[in-house]
């Protein structure tokens, strides 16, 4: 065997021993931290992580977590019934943050660091479920479905959406009694499968409260969506504050991302910190359900 081969083997052995020692040290350090040490007090003192190391680890973890939520994926909890039956109170949708690019609203507290949208500016499509900052005060996070794009002409007649003169297609699905735990009311809703006009989005479900079919939000003439804005509606058509009333058009800058999956869902108004109520209230059939 050549000297070079002997040298390489010795080097490999040293590297393996070094990695093994590092691994043993890490395991031993955290074992001692959480379960106590069986070694001498002097040795334990040397191996205990300092407060500075702990704070550094916590700072790095929080930074990575925050950056992930700012720029990759985020999650929100649905507080109202405006998107029933697609999203229920207590659902937690996962939101893609990069889909429409980034604005100051992509960051917590919406700091005024820059204006407009930056990077990855993909076009918004009709039928997508989006999360955005409320146009009026830029404080609340809102989730709705995109109905009209900039330049579209939107009208509603007897609750049926028309975009550029083309009506949506509705197919009756069922009737059901819905309990709104926030309003403490029971309402009979009629559910339809809906195909939006001029859209490649898949069929989704919407709900109507039949006595409201003749109301003003369900009957208005064509309005044109301004450039740089979007017309949005909730799927629970008669119990939604949206572009028809109360919310207005949504500025492009306010978009935060596209909702893609329901990653968690809990019923009966149970809070995340009420862990003792989780198991009997989790909606297991909604976990990792695709949002369409």
Image: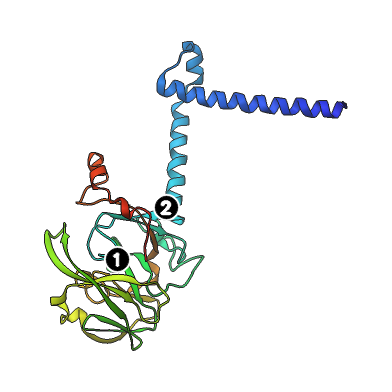
- Residue 47, x across and y down, in percent: 51, 20
Does residue 47 sit above or below 183 in this rendering? above
Q: Nearer the viewer, residue 63 or 96?
A: 96
User: Residue at coordinates 43% horizontally, 37% vertically from top-left?
Assistant: 58
Q: Mark 2 and mark 1: span between their CA atoms?
A: 19 Å
The tag on residue 134 is 1
Image position of 146 (left or right of 41) = left
Colouring chosen for the image of the structure: rainbow
* Residue holding disc 2: 69
User: Residue at coordinates 48% horizontally, 16% vertically from top-left?
Assistant: 44
User: Residue at coordinates 40% horizontally, 78% vertically from top-left?
Assistant: 199
Furthest toward the top, the residue is 40
Crowdedness near tag 2: few (<14), some (14–19) or many (≥20) residues, C-alpha within 10 Å: some
- Residue 78, x across and y down, in percent: 27, 57
SS of the residue under disc 1: loop
Q: Quadrant of residue 157?
A: bottom left
Q: Nearer the viewer, residue 203 or 129?
A: 203
Q: Quadrant of residue 144?
A: bottom left
Image position of 45 (left or right of 88) = right
User: Residue at coordinates 22% horizontally, 48% vertically from top-left?
Assistant: 270
Image position of 162 (left or right of 126) = left
Does residue 68 sit above or below 160 in this rendering? above
């Amino acid at each position: 065997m050549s000297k070079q081969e002997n040298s390489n083997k010795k080097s490999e052995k040293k590297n393996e021993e070094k990695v093994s020692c590092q691994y043993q040290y890490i395991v031993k350090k955290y074992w001692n931290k959480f379960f106590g040490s069986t070694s001498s007090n002097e040795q334990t003192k040397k191996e205990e992580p300092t407060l500075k190391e702990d704070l550094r680890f916590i700072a790095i973890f929080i930074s990575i977590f925050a950056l992930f939520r700012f720029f990759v994926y985020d999650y929100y909890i649905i507080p109202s019934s405006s998107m029933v039956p697609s999203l229920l109170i207590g659902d937690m949708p996962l939101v893609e943050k990069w889909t429409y690019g980034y604005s100051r609203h992509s960051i917590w507290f919406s700091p005024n660091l820059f204006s407009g949208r930056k990077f990855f500016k993909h076009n918004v499509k009709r039928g997508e479920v989006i999360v955005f900052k409320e146009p009026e005060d830029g404080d609340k996070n809102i989730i709705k479905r995109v109905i009209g794009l900039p330049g579209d002409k939107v009208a509603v007649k007897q609750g049926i959406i028309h975009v550029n003169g083309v009506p949506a297609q509705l197919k009756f699905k069922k009737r059901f009694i819905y309990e709104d735990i926030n309003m403490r009311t029971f309402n009979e809703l009629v559910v339809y499968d809906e195909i939006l006009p001029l859209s490649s989005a898949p069929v989704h479900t919407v709900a109507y409260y039949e006595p409201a079919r003749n109301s003003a939000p369900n009957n208005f003439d064509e309005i044109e969506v301004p450039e740089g804005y979007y017309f949005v509606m909730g799927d629970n058509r008669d119990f939604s504050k949206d572009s028809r009333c109360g919310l207005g058009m949504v500025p492009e800058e306010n978009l935060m991302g596209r909702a893609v999956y329901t990653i968690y869902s809990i019923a009966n108004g149970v809070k995340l910190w009420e862990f003792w109520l989780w198991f009997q209230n989790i909606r297991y059939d909604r976990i990792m359900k695709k949002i369409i």
